[in-house]
Amino acid sequence: MIETILKKLEAKRDLNSEEMQFAVESIMTGMVDDSDIEKFLLALNEKGIKEVEITAAAQVMKEKSLRFNLGDGSHIDTCGTGGTGLHTFNCSTASSFVAAAGGAQITKHGNKAISSKSGSADFLTAAGADIGHDREKLEIVFLKVGFVFLFAPLHHQSMKYVMPARQRIAQKTIFNLLGPHTNPCGAKRQVLGVYDKKLLKTFSEVSKNLHMEHVLIVHGDDGLDEITITGSTTISELKNYKINQYKISPKDFGLSTADFSEISAQTPEESLLLVREAFAGEKSAIQDMIALNAGAGLYVARKTESIADGVELAFDLMNSGKAADKLAAYVRVSNSQ
């Protein structure tokens, strides 16, 4: 059967949902050898990956993940695709703590750095947090703090079958697109950054197929998978099964645009220092960009009526010390016995 699927892909024909599910299920249970996994991934790239294929693969990956139930279903994720190759501070992680300080419940799905200098796992480890995998501990952290970090490799152990082929290929594959759609706690609301503008529509449709409640798919004109401070950001919003695309810019929120150098970070420690300064009330491009992204998170979490209201609240949460308190609480509770 996998040979038939490979022939279809090599002929540049799209897979239907059943074929894609069979292929990914076979791969993630160790039934396909490395060379065929490599052929499968390269042929998909060559053909062009479609939303039906991403949806089907995400459904299988979610089924294979170490899932567990947390909260009342209103929690949000801020997991993006990464893959921009642009070395910025850990904006989505920082904005998650601001949103959590505003009452949003966060189940943050993330990993170590792959194309950046500092992934969310690197940032949290630098802050002194324990990002381990004990499920009872994760639940306690979530209940006490309203924020929990789900370290992707520990929740998607069947990915071990794919890693050798991915490492040999050394380019983006469909598996770079699946992480944001496979939150182990089944988050139904997200702020989801993408590295390619063409993915805005695709990811909106995939989110719709996966019955998500409210998702903002974002892509900065500068290439960032965040709401950027350097210029405009395109947003594709899925809400009530309707998709609406629009652009926003810092000026819409009374903020100045900034140079890319003002938001760059070369190490997790540098990123942490920049975030701590913003959380201490220091006005900067870093603080402005966190406010934009946290504002989006607060809006998706239904803590505010609009992104603009969320941005205003985000500044208050940083300037009052509440965001810093939330980060400190997470580090403290994650390390408690």
Image: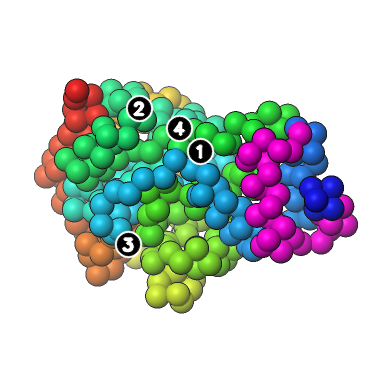
Q: Helix, strand or loop at disc 3?
A: helix
Q: Is residue 332 above or below residue 110?
A: above
Q: Which residue is mark 1?
A: 156
Q: Residue at x 58, y 59 (%)?
A: 55
3 and 1 marks in contact (CB < 8 Å) = no
Which residue type carries mark 4? Leu
4 and 2 marks in contact (CB < 8 Å) = yes
4 and 1 marks in contact (CB < 8 Å) = yes
Q: Which residue is mark 4?
A: 154
Along the viewing direction, whichever of 102 and 226 lies nearer the viewer: 102
Dot 1: few (<14), some (14–19), or many (≥20) neighbours within 10 Å?
A: many
> Which numbered disc flags the more N-terminal residue, 2 or 3?
2
Q: Which residue is mark 2?
A: 132
Question: Alpha carbon of mark 3 to alpha carbon of mark 4: how far?
Answer: 27 Å
145 lies left or right of 154: left
> Which numbered disc flags the more N-terminal residue, 1 or 2?
2
> Which numbered disc flags the more N-terminal residue, 4 or 2?
2
Which residue type carries mark 3? Val
